[in-house]
Amino acid sequence: MQTLIVQSYRTHAVAPWIGTCLKSVQAWAAASGYAYEFVDDRLFDYAPAWVRQRCAAQLLPVTDVARMHLLRERLQQGWQRVVWVDADVLVFAPERFVLDRDAPYALCHELWLRIDAAGRVDSEEKVNNAVMLVTREQPMLAFWIYAVEEILRAHAPHEIGPLTASTRFFTELATIMPLRVLRNVGLLSPPVVRDVAADGPLPREWARRFGHPVGAVNLCASLQDRVSAGAVVGERELQRAVDVLLHSRGGVFDTQPLLHLGT
C-alpha cells in the first residue's frame, strides 16, 4: 500500500529532543518503506482563514484542522494511505510500531495518568490525534473536518481550548460510536515523562494500565514548563526521557529495573 508519513514543525529554535523525535520517525518511515514529507509553518495555511481568526492565540486547534485538510489533499493527490505523526512522537522500538494494513482509519488510544494533591495515581482513557491514519476507503475524514469546524464556528474565541478540536472531540465521539485506535503508540503525561527521566515507578504503572506494548510515545511538547497532571517537566527532563527511551528501547516500561544511564 502506498503510504505517506507527514509531519510538521517550525524550522527555527528547534529543541534537540524534538529534532531527535523527528529523525526517529523519518528513520521508521524509511525502514518501513513509506514515503515521508515534512511541512514547516506553511501547515497553518491549510486551515481556513476564519478558523485561524476564530482560534486566535490557540494554535493547537488551528493545527488540528490544518492537518486534516492536508491529509485530505494528499489522499486526493493519489496516496492510498496518509499518516500524520506529531513532531513530539518518539519511535524507540520500530518493530513494535506497526501500522494495521486493514484499518481504513485509526486514531490513538490514550491513557492519561495524573497525580492528585494527595499523591495518588489516577488515570483516564481518551482518544487523541497524535497519530492519524486515513485511507481512501474511509468516510470519516470529511465528517471530522465538518464536525470540528462546526464546533469551532459555534464557540466564541474565549471558549475554544487547546483540545477542543482534538482529544476532547474524539474522546466524546468515542462515547457514542466505536473508533478505531492504535494501541502500539502511547501518550506520556508530565508525571510519567518525569519518572522516565528519573527512573521512577510511574512508567511501569502507566504500562500496566495501558495494557499493550508500545513502540512509540507522544511526549506532549505543548505541556513543557507547565504544571499538568500533577507535575512539570522542562527541556532537560524531556531530553533525558528521550535518551532513556532510546537507550532502553522501551525497557523503562518493563517490570525489570531500568538500567541507569550516565549523566
Image: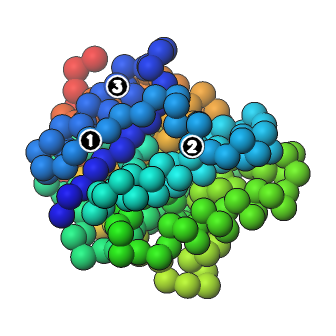
Residue at which label 3 appears? 19
Quadrant of the rendered structure where residue 131 is? bottom left
Under mark 1, the amino acid is Tyr
In three-dimensional space, the C-alpha distance between marks 2 and 1, rounded to whole angstroms, equals 18 Å
Residue at which label 1 appears? 36
Q: Where 19 falls versus 190 (above or below)?
A: above
Viewer-nearest residue: 227 or 198: 227
Which residue appears at 70% of the width and 59% of the height? 149
Q: Is residue 219 left or right of residue 226?
A: left
Q: Position of residue 155 (x, y in %)?
A: 85, 57
In three-dimensional space, the C-alpha distance between marks 3 and 2, rounded to whole angstroms, equals 23 Å
Q: Position of residue 140 (x, y in %)?
A: 50, 73
Which residue appears at 58% of the width and 71% of the height? 143
- Which callout, 2 or 1, points to the residue nearer the camera? 2
- Few, some or many residues within 10 Å of mark 2 (<14, 14–19, 20+): some
Q: Is residue 85 left or right of residue 231?
A: left
Q: Is residue 43 visible?
A: yes
- Mark 1 residue element: strand
- Quadrant in the picture for the C terminus: top left
Closer to the chain start, of discs 3 and 2, is: 3
- Mark 2 residue element: helix
Which residue appears at 36% of the width and 75% of the height? 137
Viewer-nearest residue: 162 or 186: 162
Residue at which label 2 appears? 46
Closer to the chain start, of discs 2 and 1, is: 1
Under mark 3, the amino acid is Gly
Q: Where 151 falls versus 228 (above or below)?
A: below
Closer to the chain start, of discs 1 and 3, is: 3
Q: Is residue 103 left or right of residue 51?
A: left
Viewer-nearest residue: 169 or 62: 62
In three-dimensional space, the C-alpha distance between marks 1 and 3, rounded to whole angstroms, equals 15 Å
